[in-house]
Amino acid sequence: MRYETDVIIELKSGMLDPEGTTIKRALEHLGYTPESVNTAKKYTITLDSDNIHAARENVEEMCQKLIANPIIHNYSITLREI
Amino acid sequence: MRYETDVIIELKSGMLDPEGTTIKRALEHLGYTPESVNTAKKYTITLDSDNIHAARENVEEMCQKLIANPIIHNYSITLREI
């Protein structure tokens, strides 16, 4: 079966987010009043797998080994069959 | 009312995604077989607004003026009251 997976990599709370701070300031310069701006990365990974459990396990491993840094990141995974 | 908005900024189809290509190759080196890896940015913007329609309009404007580049990006906005 073929699965499309969305992986969201967010900074752990308390981590500095300079990109978010810069965008917040730029929006304020344009006249907007956002209370906060936080940034994250989204990775969409398509893969073949026997079933949805194996696919999730596979993507979990990818996050732990390569995509996320467990010291500074939280990640969440959502899968759908395609 | 206070709203939390998720803005997803994706590359338009056909645009090169070198970060995605690099991650796909790195995953292959680790023994995984992803079919494709695409990257996107997620911005979570908290703001005060009179109602959800005004909030959405506000964030649409932010995307058009600052956050997204309409030549290379598609964006999607989801809002929830918090």
Image (cartoon, coloured by chain):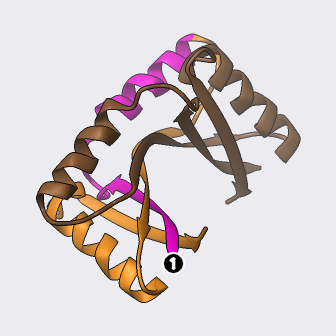
Chain colours: A orange, B brown
In the rendered image, the vertical position of residue A54 relative to residue A78, given as above or below: below
Q: Tell me which amino acid carries mark 1.
A: Met
User: Which chain hosts label 1?
Assistant: A
Residues rendered magenta in the picture: A1-29
Q: Indicate left or right for A3 with A61 as reference.
A: right
Corner quadrant of residue B29: bottom left
> Which residue occupies 69% across, 32% down?
B59
Q: Indicate left or right for B15 with A13 as reference.
A: right
Number of numbered discs on residues: 1
In the rendered image, the vertical position of residue A80 relative to residue B67, given as above or below: below
Residue closest to the eye, B60 or A8: A8
> Which residue occupies 58% across, 72% down?
A80
Looking at the picture, how far across and down is residue B4, in whole percent? Answer: 63, 50
Residue closest to the eye, B58 or A48: A48
Residue assigned mark 1: A1
Is A38 in the magenta?
no
Residue closest to the eye, A19 or B81: A19
Residue closest to the eye, A60 or A73: A60
Is residue B66 among the parts visible in the rendering? yes
Looking at the picture, how far across and down is residue B78, in whole percent? Answer: 70, 50
